[in-house]
Amino acid sequence: MSARFISLEGGEGVGKSTQARRLADALRTRGLDVLLTREPGGSPGAEAIRSLLLEGDANRWSPGAEALLFAAARADHVTRTIDPALSEGQWVICDRFLDSSRAYQGMAGGVGDAAIQNLHQIGSDGRLPDRTLVLALTDTDAAARADARDAGCPDRIGGRASDFHAEVAQAFRDFARDDPERIRLVDASGSEGEVTERLLAALADLLP
């Protein structure tokens, strides 16, 4: 059975991590061999970089330095975890991937989309998911969920100003508009079960 690489994307508070776990479980019930992973992280080297990226003051790194760190973490993740799993026929479900760097550092951070994609070509040989599912909420609902999740202690990226996160959300919408074959917007409102069913529907053409 063909391996597939699926990424879940979106801004803060839309439920990516919860839905990544639920989607992996749903695919396993269909008999698929599924690896659930995340970014930044997913391999020993990338997990070491994760703490550098998410801990400390909001201004610890410039957008360019962040972009380089994410690209380095992703390169290790692809080499050590994602590509081996795909070569073994597994489905890989990844909580964030390239499109987060495009949205956060490239667009909202001002580094530029072309620069982010060039780094990805160098570090990860341009590896793209077969399907990217972008969970979408209104800015107000997403902010409320993020506040409840973080209990007043967001990481250094999640704690940025509301206008930054609005730019991130718009970037994801633009990506979906420009690449509708790979990137699908999925309504993240409603119950967890309802959202999972929408994700499965957005993968229907890839499922056995």
Image (cartoon, helix red, strand yellow):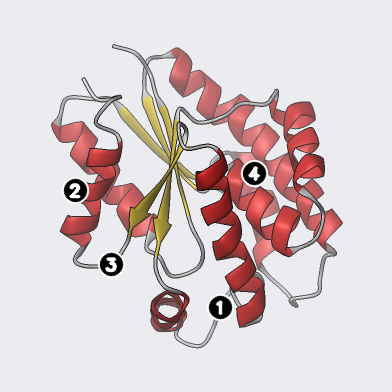
Pointer 3 residue: 189
Image quadrant occupied by the C terminus: top left
**Horizontally, is 15 left or right of 40 in the view?**
left
Q: Dot 2 corresponds to which residue? A: 197
Residue located 46% across and 79% down the image: 143
Question: Dot 1, how many residues are within 10 Å of its Cα: few (below 14), some (14-19), or many (20+)?
Answer: some
At a point 45% along the width and 83% down the height, the residue shown is: 147
Residue position marked by numbered label 1 in the rendering: 154
Identity of the amino acid at label 4? Answer: Ala
The answer for how far apart the CA atoms under marks 1 and 3 are is 22 Å
**Of label 1 and label 3, which has the lower sequence position?**
1
User: x, y percentage for residue 192?
Assistant: 21, 61
User: Is 108 situated above or below 64?
Assistant: below
96 or 46: nearer the viewer: 96
**What residue is rendered at 34% in x and 13% in y?**
2
Helix, strand, or loop for circle 3?
loop
Residue farthest front in this picture: 177
In the rendered view, does 107 fall on the left or right side of 32?
Answer: right
| Labels 3 and 2 touching (C-beta < 8 A) | no
Which quadrant, please, contains the N terminus? top left
Residue occupied by mark 4: 46
What kind of element bears circle 1?
loop
